[in-house]
Every structure is written in C-alpha cells, then in structure tokens.
Image (tube, rainbow, N blue to C red):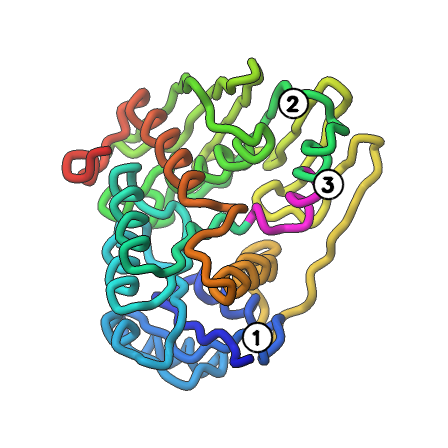
Amino acid sequence: MAPLRWAIVSAGTISHDFACAVSTLPEADHRIVAVSARGLENARKFAELHGIPRFYEDYAAIAKDAEVDVVFIGTVSSAHYEVSRMMLEAGKHVLCEKPLCVNRGQVRALLDFARTQQRFCMEAIWSRFFPSYAHLRERTVRGDLGRVQHVEVQFGFPVTHVERVRMKSLGGGAVLDLGVNAIQVAMWAFQAEPLRVEAAGQLNDEGIDVGITATLHFPNGGTARLRTSAIDRLPNKAVVTGTKGSITLHDFWCPIELTDIDGTIRSYPLPPSKVECILANSVGLRYEAEETRKRILAGEFESPTMSHQDSLALAGVQDAIRKQIGAEMPEDYIFKD
C-alpha cells in the first residue's frame, strides 16, 4: 500500500517537531511531501532540514497540490479554522493542532464542513495516543481504579513572552494554549463531559488570561481540579484517583512515564528522530500521525480516541471558563453555538 502523503502548514516549532516524529515511522507508511510557510525562505530551510521535496510560500499552494493526502496544520490558533476549511474544501484530510478552533461555534462549523466534504478531521490532542493514556483507559475501563472520584491537574510554564500566548489576535491566553491539555485529561479519566464548570482567572492589562483555576463537576459526582499558568512553572502532572487507588501521569501532556496503582513506575521510551525535536517528548507526535493513517485507510472521518464530540465538549469547557473569567475573543461575536 502507498504511503500516506503528508503536507505541513507553517514552519514553526510544533511543525518542526511533527516532521521529526514522522521521521521515526516507516517510510512505506508515511511520507512528508510538501511544506508551506509565510516566508519562502523559511519554507525552503524547513524542507531542506527535513528532506521534504516541495516547499511553498502560500498556504493555498498546499491545497492545490494533487499529491497531498493529508495536512498537518501547525499555525497559530486564530488561523486554524480558515486554513483547515481551505484544506478540507480542496479534498485534503486534516490533522490540526490544538485548540482545534477558538470557540465551540467555530469547532462545530468546521467539523460539520468536514463531514460534508467526507474527509477525516481531528484535533491533534497528541496526549491521548501515548501508551500511558492507553494504560490509564484500560485500568479505568477494567475497574482497577474503582469509581474515579477526582483528577488533580497542574500545568504551567512561563510563556507570557510567546506571541501565540500573549496576543489576542493569535488566539492567545492560558485557557486555549495550556488549559486545553488539562481539560482533556480530566475528560479522558472520567470518560465523560463535565456537567458544570466553576472557574476563576487572572487577566493581564490586555485582557489576556495568564492563569486559571477551575473545578469540573462530572455526572458520577466526581470532580477535576485544574490549575494552569502562563507565568509560573507548575508540577505538570495529572493524578487520577478512584475508590481503589490512583495513577499519576508525569509530564501528563506527553507522558512517557507513569506511577501505577501499586506504585510501580512504568516507562514507555520514545525512539530517536533523525533531527532533534525542540519540545519535550515530541517524538510522541508519531502516535497521532499513525492514528490518522489508520482512520483514513479505514475510510473513517474521525477517531474514537479524539472524536468530533470530544472536540466540541472540550471547546465548550474552554468557552465556559473564558466567559467566567472575562477572557473574550473576537470570534465569540461571530461564531455562536
């Protein structure tokens, strides 16, 4: 069977790491054939570094490239909707970096369009495809944890200097950049959507949220306590506690190690990439790339591990948090759900 032919939109950090991760997969299954960036020189350098045969300055050129099957979108958050829709309209499948869109209204519009185009579209919540997450789900489904009662998540880095975080026009803020990771792991642990959200937050002078605390209330009476910060470095782990014990995911958004119910440390090492990644454990992006290939080959338009409904629910929680702390986005007045 022919390899899945990838294109990458944007030549930033996450796109670099995605290319590194794909390089660890069999070339018979995955091949990156094109990259596009806002500057032609940036695209050229990226292509040269990663051995990609074609590079473009215009994103639309990727949409027009007949030899592209699927597009990884690594642009800033505010561009996700427009670029994803462009690729879907051109008949490409889409794997789009998180958050899928700025709000739930945009998410619904995009996923509805993907369905009409009969193309695969998935929010790149890479965490869920790590073996550690599979182990947690297996334990919870089997009942080893008992009834899940509480999830405690802390996630923080000093990133207020980063443009994508500090600029509202780019879809900035702690909720969309960091909170998405904390919310999704809570939903993964409970295997449900929260019924109620209570949140408080800190805004900077530009009205950008730089830190939040939130409690999510789930149908079984369980709760998740989340804290994110774009100012402080936090422990960055998730502790899932049930009536029979707990599991801790270390570096929970990209965990290659967990502490199991019995205290055993389980490790899931990653293979080396041809070019060094920039961010921690980014070779783990290979798992979501392989899931994308699996679903496309099966003729499916979404993944059960990160379904369209999961993305809608995730965006809904982000919307609720932003509304409670007063972190508005221009898209909130255009795309309503």
Are the residues tagged 3 and 2 within 8 Å (C-beta)? no
| SS state under label 1 | loop
Up-down: is 94 above or below 135? below
The outermost residue toward the top is 221
Q: Is residue 18 magenta?
A: no
Residue drawn at the location 47% of the way across and 28% of the way down = 193
> Within 10 angstroms of label 3, few (less than 14), some, or many (20 or more) residues?
many
Residue 57 in sight in this render: no
Gap in Å between the C-alphas at discs 3 and 1? 29 Å
Which residue does the image show at 27% across and 72% down from the upper left? 63
Name the foreground residue: 116 vs 240.
116
Rounded to the nearest angstrom, the CA distance separating label 1 from label 2 is: 38 Å
User: Which residue type carries mark 2?
Assistant: Val
Q: Secondary structure at mark 2?
A: strand
Q: Quadrant of residue 210?
A: top left
| Residue 67 pos. (x, y %) | 37, 81
- Give the total of numbered labels: 3
Label at residue 29: 1
What residue is disc 3 on?
258
Along the viewing direction, whichever of 102 and 93 lies nearer the viewer = 93
Residue 139 placed where, x, y %? 73, 35
Amino acid on which the number 1 mark rests in the picture = Asp
Residue 148 x, y percent position in the rendering: 65, 22
Q: Which residues are magenta?
A: 127-136
Name which of mark 1 and mark 2 comes first in the sequence. Answer: 1
Q: Is residue 129 magenta?
A: yes
- The residue closer to the viewer here, 196 or 156, is 196
Please state which amino acid type lies under the numbered disc 3. Answer: Leu
Residue that badge 2 annotates: 148
